[in-house]
Image (cartoon, rainbow, N blue to C red):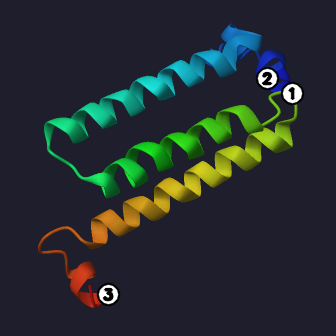
Amino acid sequence: MKDDEKAGVKSFAVRLGGRIRPVLSLFALTIFATLAWAGYLNGQGTPYYVVSVFGSSALCLWHIWSFDSKDPQSCWEVFVVRLLTWLHASDLILRCLPGSSLCRGAGL
């Protein structure tokens, strides 16, 4: 956040200051509640709740509460881990779309 303040960036993190973790946690819990509700409406089973709701909420809340907002290196590491996770997940999803030649080429 120090870098943002020095550069004059008006980011969400600068605006919230020390309240960033509770606010991000509230956003995250809202997302997980809607995931659980969607699973209920679609009749999903236990694997959905374990992986999609519990697994993603545990990982997300761990990221929110484990980094040091005053340490740029810590912030960067969390950012990179999340970026790589999303890139990998996106790759898997795109490979397995119906009719995807990538899916057939991967032997899936």
Give the position of the C terminus as an image quadrant: bottom left
Q: Do the residues labelled 3 and 1 touch (CB within 8 Å)?
A: no
Residue 38 placement: quadrant: top left
Q: Which of marks 3 and 1 is nearer the N terminus?
A: 1
**Is 64 left or right of 97, judged from the image as shown?**
right
In the picture shown, does residue 88 fall above or below 11? below
Q: What element carries label 1?
A: loop
The one of 56 and 94 positioned closer to us in this rendering: 56
Q: Where is residue 33 in the image (x, y as percent from the top left)?
A: 37, 28
Count of numbered tags:
3
* Residue carrying label 3: 106
Q: Residue at x 39, y 66 (%)?
A: 91
Query: Residue placed at 49% from the left, 50% from the top?
Result: 55
Q: What element carries label 2?
A: loop
Crowd band around label 1 with a 10 angstrom C-alpha radius: few (<14), some (14–19), many (20+)? few
Locate residue 75: give its quadrant.
Answer: top right
Are dots 1 and 2 in contact, CB under 8 Å?
yes
The CA span between labels 3 and 1 is 43 Å
Per the model, the C-alpha gap separating discs 1 and 2 is: 7 Å
Residue identifier under label 1: 70
* Kind of residue indicated by mark 1: Lys
Nearer to us in this view, 12 or 38: 38
Q: Give the class, few, some or many, for how many residues have Cα within 10 Å of label 3's Cα (few <14, many ≥20).
A: few
Please name the residue shown 58% across and 23% down the image. Answer: 24
Residue 23, relative to residue 31: is it above or below? above
Q: Give the number of the mark in front: 1 or 2.
A: 1
Left or right of 42 in this view: 47:
right
**Disc number lying in front (3 or 2):** 3
* 80 to 9, vertically: above or below: below
Across and down, in percent, residue 9 comes to 70, 17
Q: Give neighbour class at mark 2: few <14, some 14-19, many 20+ (Cα, 10 Å).
A: some
What number is the disc on residue 1? 2
